[in-house]
Amino acid sequence: MTKATFSSRGDKLLSVDILGHAGYADEGEDIVCAAISSAVMLTHALLFDVQRIPVDTLIEDDGAHIRITLPEGAEMERGQDALAALRLHFTELEQNYSEFLSVMEVHTDAED
């Protein structure tokens, strides 16, 4: 199962952490994993290559762990729509493939 965790503070999304493989089908035939991977790649391309937001990106274990974190400040504001769209897309995928994708949001306390 893939677990996607969105972190937020107040009404702002800070990051998304995606862990695990969906396990819907064998490698190369897993449509759930392909949908997740494609959405993450599109989101990263929008943030980093198109909007030129210097996101912090972590990719480990041959893609079984991916994290995208927005920088603080004005660039975080500019990245909100991209992460919100990814969260919406994942939530819709979860409705159809709940055995293979879990989406959650973790709220952190506001900065002092």
Image: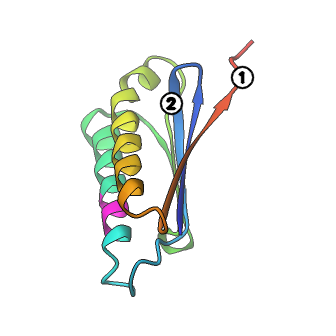
**Is 44 in front, or is 10?**
10
**Could you say whether the residue bearing mark 2 is in a helix, strand or loop?**
strand
Amino acid bearing label 1: Asp
Answer whether residue 59 is visible to the viewer in this image.
no
**Where does the magenta region start and end?**
34-38
Q: CA distance from mark 1 to mark 2?
A: 12 Å
Q: Residue at position x 51%, y 18% from top?
A: 73
**Is 33 in front, or is 51?**
33
**Could you say whether the residue bearing mark 1 is in a helix, strand or loop?**
loop
Mark sitting on residue 13: 2
User: What residue is shown with label 1?
Assistant: 109
Percent x, y for residue 33? 38, 69
Does the stretch in magenta take in 35? yes
Quadrant where the C terminus is found in the figure: top right
Crowding at label 2, few (<14), some or many (≥20) Cα neighbours within 10 Å? many
Percent x, y for residue 30? 34, 78
| Residue 36 in the figure: left or right of residue 55 | left
Does the stretch in magenta take in 11? no
Answer whether residue 33 is visible to the viewer in this image.
yes
* Main secondary structure type of the part rendered in magenta: helix
Percent x, y for residue 51? 28, 32
Q: Residue at position x 37%, y 44% from top?
A: 86
